[in-house]
Image: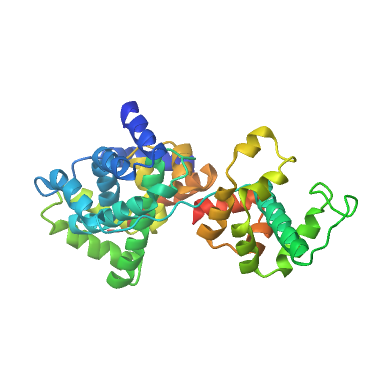
């Protein structure tokens, strides 16, 4: 986000011009938020549904935004929570355990016209998807988005130590999934 | 263990791609309009106002003053100067006990009936800057937030602030 956009949004919020602030937020962040969600839920239709929920929550909560954190951190946190809520529900519907979930996700990805990866990439995505949702989020942030631990700690409101441990477990599990399949 | 992880990470590095997924053509172009349409009828949550304990006590002091004044007038008692307590002399605990026992609606009504004169009459304990603050803000706050007196008095300011942010 450019400094100008940040200032614009902060100015709108100060003046309680929430509609303008929301418009600007949407304009600047819609793609980043969508991709953050898509990497968690994998399928476009699901990412579209979760994105809509995120923006509706952002709209409702904008007047309460405390400005203690950067607005993107706040938005990112909403997206993270919505994705995790969605994934928890989804897993209960699809599979009883992570191995079954891996197999189902792998098969779905291979038949998904919107997925452009090869076999090993589909396995990696299915392995990431089979992690507990919070580990999945930590792995995505570190691996794909190359976020610093401190930034992740701000977003997820947890400690750097806990995140490092979580990332380590995630990497080990992914390795096991890929080697075992 | 760290080295072992490093090795796996290096292997994963080779698989990192940003273009693994497609989105329908024009999806992001239409997204803004679609979401703006969706939120049109959705009301926003009201901003939680944060009020300091000091301000809460000012409200309590003003209310106590108004109720006391009202009671004194009704009973036509003319207290002597020595019998009248100043706000400095009223212990916080006494105010709290009074407010906890008193019917909340009556307190709010009493405060609503206070005139600016009532408030200004005993504003000598306020600084010049504080005098400029509109007392209506406090009253509006109590009504808006529908807080019970217990909530106002018993809440730790920092915790209160946290709750306001969290809710």
Residue that appears at 75% across and 62% down: B73
Image position, residue B126 (x, y; %): 71, 39
The image quadrant that residue A19 belongs to is top left
Residue that appears at 67% across and 50% down: B118
Q: Please, is residue A104 above or below residue B157 in the view?
A: below
| Residue furthest right as drawn | B82
| Residue furthest top as drawn | A3
How is the protein colored in the picture? rainbow
Q: Please, is residue B18 above or below residue B89 in the view?
A: above
Q: Is residue A31 left or right of residue B128?
A: left
Q: Is residue B160 left or right of residue B45?
A: right
Image position, residue A2 (x, y; %): 31, 28
Q: Is residue B141 left or right of residue A12?
A: right
Image position, residue B25 (x, y; %): 8, 46
The image quadrant that residue A60 belongs to is bottom left
Q: Quadrant of the N terminus of chain A?
A: top left
Q: Decide if residue B143 is in sight here.
A: yes
Q: Nearer the viewer, residue B102 or A134?
A: B102
Q: Quadrant of the C terminus of chain A?
A: bottom left
Residue that appears at 51% across and 50% down: B165
């Amino acid at each position: 986000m450019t400094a100008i956009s940040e200032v614009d949004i902060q100015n709108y919020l100060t003046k309680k011009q929430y509609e303008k602030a929301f418009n600007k937020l949407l304009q600047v962040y819609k793609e980043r938020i969508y991709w953050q969600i898509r990497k968690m839920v994998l399928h476009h239709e699901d990412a579209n549904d979760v994105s809509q929920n995120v923006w509706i929550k952002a709209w409702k909560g904008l007047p309460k935004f405390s400005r203690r954190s950067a607005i993107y951190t706040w938005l990112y946190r909403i997206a993270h929570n919505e994705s995790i809520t969605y994934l928890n529900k989804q897993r209960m519907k699809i599979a009883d355990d992570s191995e079954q979930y891996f197999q189902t996700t792998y098969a779905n990805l291979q038949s998904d016209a919107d997925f452009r990866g090869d076999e090993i990439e589909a396995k990696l995505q299915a392995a990431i998807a089979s992690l507990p949702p919070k580990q999945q989020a930590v792995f995505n942030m570190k691996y794909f988005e190359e976020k610093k631990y401190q930034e992740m700690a701000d977003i997820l409101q947890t400690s750097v130590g806990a995140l490092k441990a979580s990332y380590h477990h995630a990497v080990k599990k992914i390795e096991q999934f890929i080697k075992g399949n | 263990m760290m080295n072992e992880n490093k090795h796996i990470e290096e292997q994963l590095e080779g698989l990192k791609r940003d273009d693994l997924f497609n989105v329908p053509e024009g999806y992001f172009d239409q997204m803004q309009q679609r979401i703006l349409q969706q939120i049109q009828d959705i009301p926003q949550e009201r901003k939680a106002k944060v009020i300091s304990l000091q301000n809460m006590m000012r409200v309590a002091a003003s209310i106590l003053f108004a109720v006391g004044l009202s009671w004194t007038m009704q009973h036509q008692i003319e207290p002597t100067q020595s019998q009248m307590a100043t706000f400095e002399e009223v212990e916080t605990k006494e105010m709290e006990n009074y407010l906890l026992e008193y019917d909340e609606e009556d307190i709010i009504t009493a405060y609503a009936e206070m005139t600016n004169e009532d408030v200004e009459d005993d504003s000598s304990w306020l600084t010049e800057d504080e005098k400029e603050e509109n007392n209506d803000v406090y009253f509006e706050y109590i009504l808006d937030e529908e807080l019970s007196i217990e909530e106002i008095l018993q809440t730790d300011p920092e915790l209160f602030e946290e709750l306001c942010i969290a809710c």
